[in-house]
Amino acid sequence: MKVTAEELLQKKRLGQRITVLTCYDYPTALWEDQVGVDVIFVGDSVGTNILGYTSERDVTMDDMIHHLRAVERGVSHAYLLVDMPYGSYRTPSEALANAKTMVEFGADGVKFEGADFAIASSLHAAGITVWGHLGLSPQLHEKRGLRAKTAAEALQLIEDSLELQDAGASFLIYEMIPEEVGKIASERLRIPTIGIGAGRYTDGQVQIIADLLGVNAFEFRHVFKYAHFQGTAVDAITRYAEDVRNGDFPRPQNVRHLRKHELLKLEAALEIEAG
Ligand code: KIV
């Protein structure tokens, strides 16, 4: 059974935390789905984490669809969320056309950045589950770092959140805001909030899978590295390259042999040919 938006909402009502994790490929989707992550999220962070782009703004609809399709093949249980890339929702009608494409390719909900209430309501009116994203918005803000740092900015974020909720957003992601702001906003909203660098009191947490697995060397305060894939991968690749250079790979158990009598026949044939 697939996780539904209604079940996620119910989790908020019951005080159960929602688990969200980014995912960009099929094998990772299988792992995340297998352990029961609630929401598997194809974020536009695919650009900087997987595609080698320098900015989230370089990510295209084609990139998102390509990764959405790979992830979708690996998801049978989790709710599947996808990001709308930069430039794909400049107007409500453009947002709607692109969001419909995402849904056709298997997305259960779509996320866009910023306090654009017209977009939220046009997607909602078309029956698409909308996820908002406030606080730090990598597509919109050149400068990284904490948002809603003053009372006035925090108030604005709370007002924008309530307005997005009224416009039809079913979920909100908060990125890089003080814990106190995440807590107050989450208490005031009926819809679930999911935080990244937003403290402990949002209704759920989202992390970038590459950060959590230690695929990169970045050190962020809001990340706990549960694994160190970079070290493991570099070590394995180094040993492979050394083994090939030294003639230690393939090992005897990695090779297949011609049967003895076939080898004898081949050698005889070659001798005849050589005259
Ligand atoms: O693309 C992404 O990974 C995101 C998260 C930072 C929430 O939007």
Image (cartoon, helix red, strand yellow):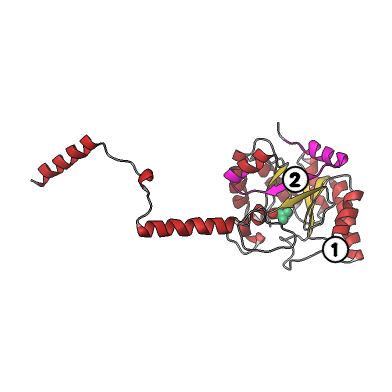
Q: Is residue 177 left or right of residue 88?
A: right
User: Can residue 46 be seen?
Assistant: yes
Residue under label 2: 19
**Residue 17: within the magenta?**
yes
Quarter of the rendering containing residue 136: bottom right
Point out the residue furthest to the left here. Answer: 275
Establish whether ligand 1 lies closer than 8 Å to the Cβ of label 1: no
Specify the amino acid type for callout 1. Ala
Quarter of the rendering containing residue 198: bottom right
Specify the amino acid type for callout 2. Thr
Tag of residue 230: none
Asked whether 213 or 235 is in front, the reply is 235
Q: Quadrant of the N terminus?
A: top right
- Ligand 1, seen in the image, is in the quarter at bottom right
Whether tag 2 and tag 1 are in contact, CB under 8 A, the answer is: no
Secondary element at image label 1 = loop
**What is the x, y in percent for residue 201?**
85, 52
Q: Is residue 83 left or right of residue 11?
A: left
Point out the residue furthest to the top here. Answer: 1
Characterize the local packing of mark 2: few (<14), some (14-19) or many (20 or more) Cα atoms within 10 angstroms: some
Secondary element at image label 2 = strand
Quote the CA–CA distance across marks 2 and 1: 24 Å
Residue under label 1: 148
**What is the x, y in percent for residue 159?**
90, 56
Quarter of the rendering containing residue 71: top right
